[in-house]
Image (cartoon, grey):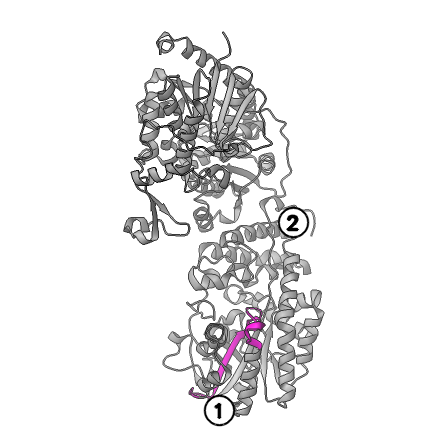
Amino acid sequence: MPAICFYFQVHQPYRLRKYTFFDLGHDHTYEDSGLNEEILNRVTENCYLPANALISRLIDATDGKVKVSYSLSGVVMDQMNEWRPDALASFARLSDYKSVEFLGETYYHSLAALYDWDEFHRQRQLHQSTLRKYLNREASVFRNTELIYSNEIAQAIAPFYQGILGEGVDWYMEGHHPNHVFRVPKGKGLGLLLRNHRVSDEISFRFPEIGLNADEFLDRIEALPGEIINLFLDYETFGEHIKADIGILDFLEEIFKKAVERKIKFRKPTKAIEKAASPEKLSIPSLTSWADTERDTSAWRGNEMQRLALKKVYELGPSVRKNNTPMVWEQWGRLQTSDHYYYMSTKGKADGEVHEYFNPFNTPYDAYIHFMNVLSDFELRIKGHTTEV
Amino acid sequence: MAQPKVLMLGWEFPPLINGGLGIASHGIAQALAHRTALSLILPKVHPDFALANTQLIGLNQLNLKKTVTAELQRDFFNKVEEVYRVSVGLDPYYVAHEDKKDISIFSYSEKDKTESEEEIDPNPFQVSEDLYDHHVIDKVRFYTRHVLSMAEEKDFDIIHAHDWMTFPAALELKLATGKPLVLHVHSLDYDRGGPELKNWIYSLEKEVLQEADKIVAVSHYTASILREHYDVAADKIQAVYNGIEPREAYKKKKGFPEKLVLFLGRVTGQKGPEIFLEVAEKVYRRYPEVRFVMAGTGDKLKRLIEAGAYTEVGHRFHFTGFLDREQVADLLAMSDVYCMPSVSEPFGLSALEAAQFNIPMVLSSQSGVSEVMPGALTADHWDTDEMSEQIIDILTNESMGRLLVEQNKEALEGLTWDRAGEQLLKLYENILEEPSLKEV
């Protein structure tokens, strides 16, 4: 009977405001603080506080048999620190439990791994030190932004972590199922945990559609081959994307309680990797992710607008390093947050709807236009063409 | 001679302005207000909007209780038997597959007509703000019938109508009353759709133009299109240029060191936005200290944004979307070059605004306004090499730019609406003095 590994992604970007051409060179306020605060408040009330309370209650009630892991982006921790210290404190309380693990990621929830390794490692380290500062934890497992993964990315982080998370993309599984711990080729023994998207999606998509119950869900898990079922989900699924009145938090509670009754084990990522006897090697040479039906990076760089925006952001690297002021580093990092590019996606159908969520702009074109204006202003500032800096 | 009594038929009018037509109609009406006894019938008149010495009639304000009985003598509307209307968000190419389920077809069959005539027409100008939505043909038909019905009680010497939306009403009026008809051409289907697109509107324009007594073209360029593409006799056409209200120009400091090249107008094929992007790319390659701004919105905007991102000038090519009058002025106050690469531009009022703001300009040769701007550099709209060359010349040679601006400034002094009003008054008088018309 396989064990369950839960991992919850906690992230909110600093969304940009409608920064027009007329602002260019005059106004250096890029973000919509009002909106960001409002969303953070909403998500804190709907999800972070009630879901954290539920998890700590469950851990207490099961003597630590309930185990989960989180990854909090640096920018969501900063926003909590500024607007909802109670949310951050609630995660800090969870960090007192041994049953809770915190994972490492890029501070700005960025795509730096695809463009700039130096910047990637800067953000990785910054995230590590922030985790230490707010939650007094060290991450020993890494998960890259939106589970963007390839051999190369795994190899890049191998010296610093014990494991990494990825998406179990069917067409790279070479006949395997994702319910094992794998070994990264040339990864210095780095363990790889792959998301079981079918079972994960049962919670985020099938539950609200058909009102799945916990027993049915666990029946399904018990019947699966392998030793670990990786359920990787956006934390906001619980109470925000799916509202509490539909019963999503109750569903989560039932899963944990009934699993403990049925003697199904929970594992944290690090433990799952440590316990794996002789993990099989799995090579994923191309970029994969958990986003959209394509499960690649097309959610962020599928069209010309996205590609140009990303190209121009990373072209600023040398100027940022030359400038080397905290403000510029911070601003550059925030402009790298993947959500900005996600909002520029022109994909239709179901994926398009997902891109709309929390999107401050009406259309991908608006997202692009305003982002590019911001980027122009930022470039002018770091190159010394405006008065301040 | 007593002031002629003019019944003017308009479509766009302040504060409801989509393009040059509304501004021009207003300028002309204002200039004619004290020269003629002027009544102006419009689809919509804003309750707070008045024009001295003019009777403004908005169909939106009328209580159209009684059934309109006026018989139309021409069958403009029956000709649009089937107009394909594609619902929003649907791929227009589906039309070619004739998948009737996805397309709403509205037809003006005889059956529909009698049904709607028995009931009282709902007044489209009380419902919608948009004068050019999917129901534009419904609106034109409504306007035609109600204008005709209202005019039975009006006393006038001459009919003066602006652009195709008012042409059916104008011709019906002429047929019903025998009064002379002046058509004022601000824009033709040829300009909007190109020479190949000869659709229902083109046929309507052509039919009514043949029967007008006199045609006012906003430029010699438009006069040439009327002759060449609408078979209008040269002696029936008179060019009367638009004017512009004088205004104080100002300068606004840019927040960036690069020069700014401005495209201002609807982002539609007619205005040549793709040409502007191509020109921008060519300019940027040789003169990188430059930004471009495309101000306006339109059906090509999305495509332009994506195409812009594909080019190396993409990060220097900005979009503003729709701007209000003040924002347009601010943008003019920041710009270093104004570029109007229109494929076909009957006049091009915004170029006059650019001249008021002392901006040197590069205009498409296929434009009316280039006839009155002696300091404008001009190139054929397809010649993006030449156009980019001219922009670089202006950017690199400031004294030349100043000289061009001076020449245009001088020309502006003669481009008043009063001058246009005076020319139109003469034109009315000539028509009314013509013996053949007096006898009618």
Does residue B242 appear in the picture of this structure? Answer: yes
| Element on which disc 2 rests | loop
Judging by the rendered image, the residue that carries numbered circle 1 is A277
Residue B366 visible somewhere in the drawing: no
Label 2 or label 1, whichever comes before in sequence order: 1
Check the image and report above or below for B216 versus A139.
Answer: above
Residue depicted at 43% across the width and 59% down the height: A348
Mark 2 vs mark 1, CA separation in Å: 56 Å
Q: Nearer the viewer, residue B241 or A337?
A: B241
Q: Inspect the image, locate mark 1, and give the three-letter code of the amino acid beneath it.
A: Ala
Q: Residue furthest left?
A: B97
| A154 shown above or below A365 | below
> For this view, does A71 lie left or right of residue A90?
left
Number of the front mark, 2 or 1? 1
The region drawn magenta spans A223-249
Using the rendered view, name the quadrant where residue A140 is placed: bottom right
Residue topped by disc 2: A384
Mark 2 and mark 1 on one chain: yes
Dot 1: within a 10 Å radius of its alpha carbon, few (fewer than 14), some, or many (20 or more) residues? Answer: few
